Image (cartoon, rainbow, N blue to C red):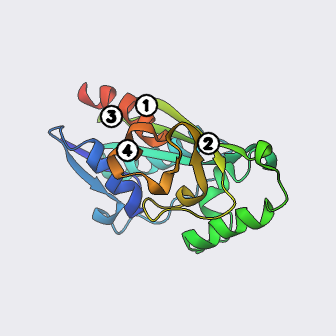
Amino acid sequence: MNLVIASRNKGKISEIKELLADLPIEVLSLFDYPSIIEIEENGETFAENAQIKAQAVYNYTKCAVMADDSGLEIDALDGRPGVHSSRFAGENAADAEKCELILNIMKNVPDEKRTARFKSVICIIDMNGSISLTEGVCNGIITHEPIGDNGFGYDPIFYIPNLNRTMAQLTSSEKNAVSHRGIALRLAVDIIKKL
């Protein structure tokens, strides 16, 4: 069976492929469909955006599709950057620029108010067009500086207290065990196994 990951984010595709490695599935991505134009994510929630992406790719490929929308919600910033996480620092901003912007905005926020969460919603559309959603959340604290070289996005500034490390200090298998996407994807795997 083919499953199209509705993404061009290499880090995200790699994480998902690793988590699906044991299943008899050919995992494809938008790199395999270069003629699919950029999909406008204009939803107000992660669930809406995941479904918009999944539906657009399903309509084009007629294959089973998995799309996720995920991001960072920071309590001191009233839940921002939220659904705008990937574009918060500008359309083509590098990961380091995104982290730097958050740290600058939060430079005067005390430790006890730096709570945040990564949230991920996965939308799966099967070959018949049926839609399923799963969600994962990982709670943490925004650091005062980037720490760690692994992962991508906001991982270097997201500290997980019970692991005493940032997301960027975890190996890929450690990250998959606790991450928002890992949690949502393990729930999604149960759905995919039934396809």
Q: Between tags 4 and 3, which lies in front?
A: 4
Number of marks present in the image shown: 4
- The answer to whether the residue labelled 1 contacts the one labelled 4, judged by CB atoms less than 8 Å apart, is no
Q: Tell me the element at label 3.
A: loop
Q: Residues within 10 Å of mark 4 (few under 14, many from 20)?
A: few
Q: Tell me the element at label 2.
A: strand
Along the viewing direction, whichever of 67 and 71 lies nearer the viewer: 71
Q: Left or right? Give the position of 126 relative to 165.
A: left
What amino acid does circle 3 point to?
Asp
User: Which residue is disc 2 drawn over?
Assistant: 140
* Residue 20 placement (x, y as % from top left): 26, 42
Along the viewing direction, whichever of 42 and 187 lies nearer the viewer: 187
* Residue 183 placement (x, y as % from top left): 44, 34
Residue that extends furthest to the front in the rendered view of this protein = 164
Q: Which numbered disc, 3 or 1, marks the residue that appears first in the sequence?
A: 3
Q: Residues within 10 Å of mark 1 (few under 14, many from 20)?
A: some
Along the viewing direction, whichever of 144 and 100 lies nearer the viewer: 144
Q: What residue lies at 46% left-to-right and 38% top-to-bottom?
A: 122
Q: Determine the CA span between mark 4 and mark 3.
A: 29 Å
Above or below for 156 versus 186: below
| Image quarter (top left, top right, bottom left or bottom right) of the C terminus | top left
User: Which residue is disc 4 drawn over?
Assistant: 174
| Mark carried by residue 126 | 3
Q: Determine the CA span between mark 2 and mark 1.
A: 30 Å
Along the viewing direction, whichever of 92 and 138 lies nearer the viewer: 138
Q: Determine the CA span between mark 2 and mark 4.
A: 15 Å
Q: Between tags 2 and 3, which lies in front?
A: 2
What amino acid does circle 2 point to?
Gly
User: Which residue is disc 1 drawn over?
Assistant: 131
